[in-house]
């Protein structure tokens, strides 16, 4: 097992040990934002460490976003990670590392990359079945296209915010089934969506497409994601063009991006796809991820969604995203859609957990929730298998609901 240099005193089973090393962007007190790497409960200033070691690659890390590094492509990502591991496991490299380590509680974490484009998918069969059963109780839960393509929509990149950012309750039009006319006002059915975000690097040209077996060359890493949803606004607006204002007001992303290489032990086979998808969605690079999430509201765990059973592979999602010739840019982000499992306690949204508000949940303080109230804090955490029976951490994505303005 690869272990940290002795002077780091980092346990080999630490959630953020050398087998993980997620990337982020941080600023020390009175300092500018720069790219860092989480090492235990500290963060390493990669640009400064690389400069001290005489590395030309220091420039891509001496910026306030990961985008320059994302643009370098897979070979550079692999080389960069190998260099970081070597620096952290070699006692002779101490002088190039120790001066550039900061305690996490002494830094500010920022949005780790500038989001170029954002796409949200709908890749959980359990979630899609639950939602279909709620809204179409007398019809088929899954729409006819669901098992033939990864359904998705383009979201608003500019309202993706880093974990810890407060979320202002959105306002908009809504109309209940019994209302004679629509009204305007704050959403009264504000929801969460526990998801996994995939961060994309390297570029492609408009008019080209990325196949399933080439998609991994563009998958840099994963991050926790909460796609906040105003269900009442969404329900009134989504026919016939789909989500708009009910989704675009805010989406929260974790401060740490776990590289795909760190998830090698978490890769699993897909649960099975029937019917067989069309040729462009087939290939050898199909996989799922054994990632466990936990959703808490005001400190009470309300759900533990498993990514394990997601129907569509991230490589299929990326292949479908580009099959029409849409280009990729460094910093593109696509999310899995709500993650839900077979059991009630594994549902990744309040819409499902409370069955559209009919079955409220009870929090630790004795209060109940059908949907989110002002002042509620939602925190999603996640872990995945690491090497030799260990686990690695994905950090958290958290946000507190503020009153509508």
Image (tube, grey):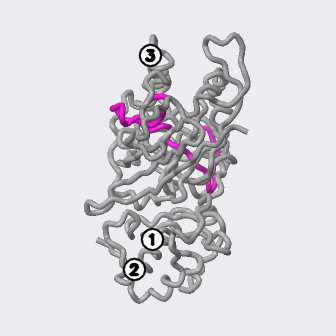
Q: Is residue 338 magenta?
A: yes
* SS type, badge 2: helix
Q: Is residue 179 visible?
A: yes
Total numbered circles: 3
Task: Count neighbours of disc 3 (C-alpha within 10 A) and say few if under 14, some if 14 to 19, many if 20 or more.
Answer: few
For this orientation, the residue located farthest to the front is 366
- Which quadrant does the C terminus fall into? top right
Q: Residue at coordinates 41% horizontally, 34% vertically from top-left?
A: 347
Give the answer, above or below, for where 138 lies relative to 348: above
Q: Which mark is residue 134?
A: none
Looking at marks 1 and 2 on the same chain, the residue that comes earlier in the sequence is marked by 2
Comparing labels 3 and 2, the label whose residue is closer to the camera: 2
* SS type, badge 3: loop
The picture places residue 38, in percent across and down from the top left corner, at 48, 68
The picture places residue 108, in percent across and down from the top left corner, at 60, 66
Closer-to-camera residue (365/275): 365
Give the answer, above or below, for where 327 lies relative to 340: below
Q: Quadrant of residue 51?
A: bottom right
* SS type, badge 1: strand
Q: Is residue 355 magenta?
A: no
Q: Which residues are magenta?
A: 324-353
The Cα–Cα distance between marks 1 and 3, rounded to whole angstroms, is 48 Å
User: According to the image, label 2 marks what residue?
Assistant: 8
Q: Are marks 1 and 2 in contact (CB under 8 Å)?
A: yes
- Which quadrant does the N terminus fall into? bottom left
Q: Residue at coordinates 37% horizontally, 63% vertically from top-left?
A: 15
Q: Is residue 284 visible?
A: no
Q: Residue at coordinates 66% horizontally, 51% vertically from top-left?
A: 116
The Cα–Cα distance between marks 1 and 2, rounded to whole angstroms, is 9 Å
The picture places residue 177, in percent across and down from the top left corner, at 61, 13
Q: Which mark is residue 39?
A: 1
User: According to the image, label 3 marks what residue?
Assistant: 140
């Amino acid at each position: 097992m690869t272990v940290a240099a002795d002077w780091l005193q980092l346990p080999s089973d630490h959630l953020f040990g050398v087998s993980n090393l997620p990337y982020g962007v941080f600023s020390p007190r009175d300092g500018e934002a720069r790219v860092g790497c989480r090492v235990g409960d500290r963060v390493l200033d990669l640009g400064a460490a690389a400069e001290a070691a005489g590395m030309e690659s220091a420039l891509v890390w001496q910026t306030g976003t990961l985008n320059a590094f994302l643009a370098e492509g897979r070979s550079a990502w692999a080389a960069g990670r190998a260099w970081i591991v070597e620096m952290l496991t070699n006692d002779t490299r101490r002088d190039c590392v120790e001066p550039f380590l900061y305690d996490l509680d002494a830094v500010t974490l920022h949005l780790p990359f500038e989001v170029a484009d954002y796409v949200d998918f709908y890749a959980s069969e359990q979630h899609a079945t639950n939602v279909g059963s709620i809204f179409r109780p007398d019809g088929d839960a899954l729409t006819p296209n669901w098992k033939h393509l990864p359904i998705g929509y383009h979201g608003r990149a500019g309202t993706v915010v880093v974990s810890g950012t407060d979320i202002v309750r959105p306002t908009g039009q809504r109309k209940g089934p019994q209302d004679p006319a629509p009204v305007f006002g704050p959403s009264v059915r504000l929801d969460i969506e526990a998801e996994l975000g995939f961060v994309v690097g390297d570029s492609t040209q408009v008019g080209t497409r990325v196949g399933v077996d080439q998609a991994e060359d563009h998958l840099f890493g994963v991050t926790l994601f909460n796609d906040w949803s105003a269900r009442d606004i969404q329900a009134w607006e989504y026919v016939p063009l789909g989500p708009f204002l009910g989704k675009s007001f805010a989406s929260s992303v974790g401060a740490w991006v776990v590289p795909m290489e760190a998830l090698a032990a978490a890769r699993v086979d897909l649960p099975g796809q029937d019917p067989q998808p069309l040729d462009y969605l087939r290939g050898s690079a199909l996989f799922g991820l054994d990632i466990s999430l936990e959703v808490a509201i005001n400190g009470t765990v309300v759900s533990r969604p498993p990514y394990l059973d997601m129907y569509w592979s991230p490589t299929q999602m990326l292949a479908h995203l580009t099959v029409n010739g849409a280009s990729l840019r460094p910093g593109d982000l696509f999310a899995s859609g709500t993650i839900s499992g077979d059991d009630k306690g594994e549902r990744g949204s309040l819409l499902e957990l409370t069955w559209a508000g009919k079955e409220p949940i009870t929090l630790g303080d004795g209060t109940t929730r059908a949907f989110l109230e002002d002042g509620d804090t939602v925190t999603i955490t996640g872990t995945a298998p690491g090497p030799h029976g260990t686990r690695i951490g994905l950090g958290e994505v958290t946000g507190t609901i503020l009153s509508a303005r």
